[in-house]
Each structure stands twice: as structure tokens, then as C-alpha cells.
Amino acid sequence: MTVRRSAVALAATATVLCAAAAPAAVAAPSPSPSVALPSGLYGTKDPTYDGVWRQSLAFLAQRTAGVTPAAKAVDWLTGQQCDSGAFPAYRADASAPCTDKTMVDTNATAAAVQALRDVGGHQDAVANAVSWLKSVQNKDGGWGYTAGSPSDANSTSIVIGALARAGEKLGDVTTDGGRTPYAALLTFAIPCGGKDGGAFAYQPDKDGKLAANADATAAGVLGALGKGLVVGNNAAVKDPTCHKGSAPEPEQAAQNGASYLAATLAKSGHLDSAPMPGAEDSAPQPDFGNTADAVVALSASGHKDKAAASVAWLEKNSAGWAKENGPAAYAQLILAAHATGADLRDFGGADLVAQLNATGPEPAAVKKPKAAATEDEEKKDSGDGDGIGGLWWFVGIGLAVGAGVGFLISGRRKNQQL
């Protein structure tokens, strides 16, 4: 999933793996849509593996910026939902009912839950999707990419985020054996004290060993904190530390993961992805999407100061990547900027909100950004001029009190915490 890795790459890989392991009745989706792309869909590339994902991320990013998506865009997303409540990555003909051959998945469903929750007005669709997600919970308490596939850190984390955004009490989402989603997620956490301690693995290998995965770690931090894909601009706290212990609580596992991410990002300011098999260039390449996700994870865990260099790196280097990859890429950058207080409309000189909006139908409404205070206005607010705190302000208050008139003075609103 682009939850931490490329949506197309993960979904395509999952399709291949699931095709080999799933019953014969389950068929992989066709490699490309047989009809022209619907006008409500964001992006122009083949949506077979990421249509619902990129649409959902686009909505989440737009809502953080005060943008209301077009009705036909929202209708397209709700129209992708099957009667079971599940969402596929994409189905070209939404007028035909889903069958047992429709490849639905937990990641698309969890992303759609969060998006529709933020758009509002689609509680029935959200409730139906949540019901399906709970119905396909694995015995270990987690989720795999498709129903019944082995649990992994990424899928478990995004479902946790979806359930939390929908108002579910995660401690009550249990298997017959009483295992919660956190029970599964913590099995992917690598203990502190050794190499790559604090990181999360995507899944254990065939021998049961865990290998650090920055992609899964960014996801695991959010999951362990019970947070969705949208994270508010949190104040930085003390440096993340990886604490030794064989069975950390979810909150500590998140801090351990944050410690790993902070140390990894400190090396170059960005994460790397391994070269594709058969590629001529065998050197690791910068991974823009996972770097953006790591920024969100660090802010969520109270360490946005450790992500500052990465935000600066993204501002300087991500424009070409975002243009090439479209709506999901712009959304990831917006979510990273939003989580750290960066300017969404001047991110390295780019208006990310306008660029995202341009990849889909014209929004129903766009909230105008609040103009920055001028130097004179800032002086007034700080008490250096004639505004609040200035000489004439005190004179005015004295006169008002003498006249028996009460004034209500309100401070600036704080950034909304999501």
C-alpha cells in the first residue's frame, strides 16, 4: 500500500502472492481498465491497483486544507464499495455487483473508511466497511492485505487507524481468543538493544526472524499510537529513546519505532528504497513516499523536531516525484507538511493543495488560506504597538471599565489537533 510503500507495487505484489495462495474462485483484477477513466477519479494513470487508495488519500489531504471534494468524486468512491462493506483497489464497472471474484482488500477499505469519515455524511458506508474489517480479523488479532492472508504490520496498522477514526474502542476489537489488534502489531516489533532495535518488520520471514523495515516502522508507529493517516501538528517533546524490554506496551513500541526512524533519517534526511530486481543501477534510491510517511510518524509520536531536516529535503527534492506519481504523492506531502506545520501552499515553492486539486474534478469548495500577519500586525499582537498590549489598549480598557462595559478578549486559536 502506499500506506508506506508504493500502492501499485504492493498491490501488484499482493495480487501475485494471493493468486498463488487464494482459492481458485478468487481472480486477480485485469491489468488495466477496459473503459475510459471515470470523471470523478483522481489521477490519469491506470487505477487497477490503487484507484480507491489514491482517491482516499486525496480526500484526506484536501480536508486538512479546508477543501471539499466534488460530489461526483465522493460518489465514485462510495460506488466502489461492495455490499459486504469491503472496497477493492478498483473496479471499472461499479454497476455490477461484487462477486467472490472481486479482489477486495483491507488497505483500500481502511483508507476509504478514513476518507469518508473526514468527508462526512456517509456513516452507513463507514459502518458497513468497519463491520467487514472486524469480520476478517485474523486469529492473532491483526490483518493481512487480503482477508485471511497472514497479518502484516502495515495492514494491521492502517486498519487500527481506520477503526480508531470510526470511533471503535480498539481494546474491544478482539478475536475469539481475546487477542486485540495491538497483540498482533507488537509481534512485528524488534526488541531494543540489538541491531535495528525498535524497528518494525513487515512480517517474519520463513524462519520467524524479523528484519527491520522503515516502511513498516512508520506504519507501526501510527498503529501503536492508535492514529490514522492524518496527524495534527504536535509539539516536540524529549528525544525518542529505545527502551529494552521483551514486551513493551503499544505506546513504548511506538517510541521505540520513532527512535529507529529518527536515527535512520539523521543519516541523510531521507529513507532509501532498494533497487528493483534487474535494475542496472544497484544503488539504493531515495524513497520520497516513505520519507513523508516517516515524517508523519515522528510528529505523531511527539518528535517533529527530528523530522525537520526531512521536511526540508522533501521541499527541495520532491517536486518531480510528486508530478510523476500524481494524487497519492501530493497527498503524502500534504499530510507530512500538515503534521509538522509546514506551508501546504508554499512547500519548496509549490502549492501542494492546488497541485492535488488539479489531478481530479474541481472541488465543491476551497477554503481560502488565512493571510499571514504583516509586520505591523505582529507588533500589535506582541504588545509593541497600539494593539493588544500597547499603550492605547490599556487606556481603552480603563475607559471601558469606567463606563461599565465588559470586553471579552480572546487569544489566538491553537492549531487543531486531529
Image (spheres, rainbow, N blue to C red):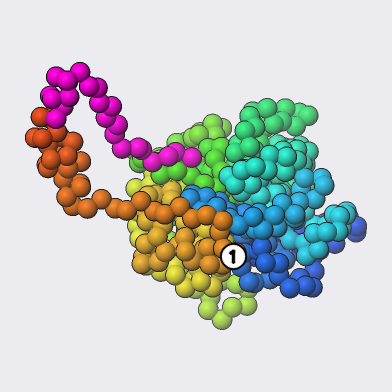
Q: Amino acid at mark 1?
A: Gly
Q: Residue at left 78%, top 65%?
A: 92
Q: Give the prevailing secondary structure in the magenta stretch.
A: loop
Q: Which residue is labeled 1 in the image?
A: 360
Horizontal relation, residue 324 to residue 56: left or right: left
Q: Position of residue 253 (x, y in %)?
A: 52, 38
Q: Residue at position x 39%, y 53% from top?
A: 369
Residue 38 sits above or below residue 340 on the image: below
Quarter of the image that includes the N terminus: bottom right
Residue 328 vs residue 182, the one in the foreground = 328
- Residue 409 lies in the magenta stretch: yes
Residue at 13% in and 40% down: 386
Above or below 46: residue 137: above
Q: Residue at x 69, y 31 (%)?
A: 173
In the rendered image, the residue lying farthest to the bottom is: 280
Q: Which residues are magenta?
A: 396-418
Q: Among all residues in the image, which is located at the extreme front?
A: 403
Residue 270 found in image quarter: bottom left
Residue 208 appears at what percent x and percent y?
67, 47
Rendering quarter of residue 360:
bottom right
Secondary structure at numbered mark 1: loop
Question: Residue 412: image x %, image y %?
Answer: 31, 37
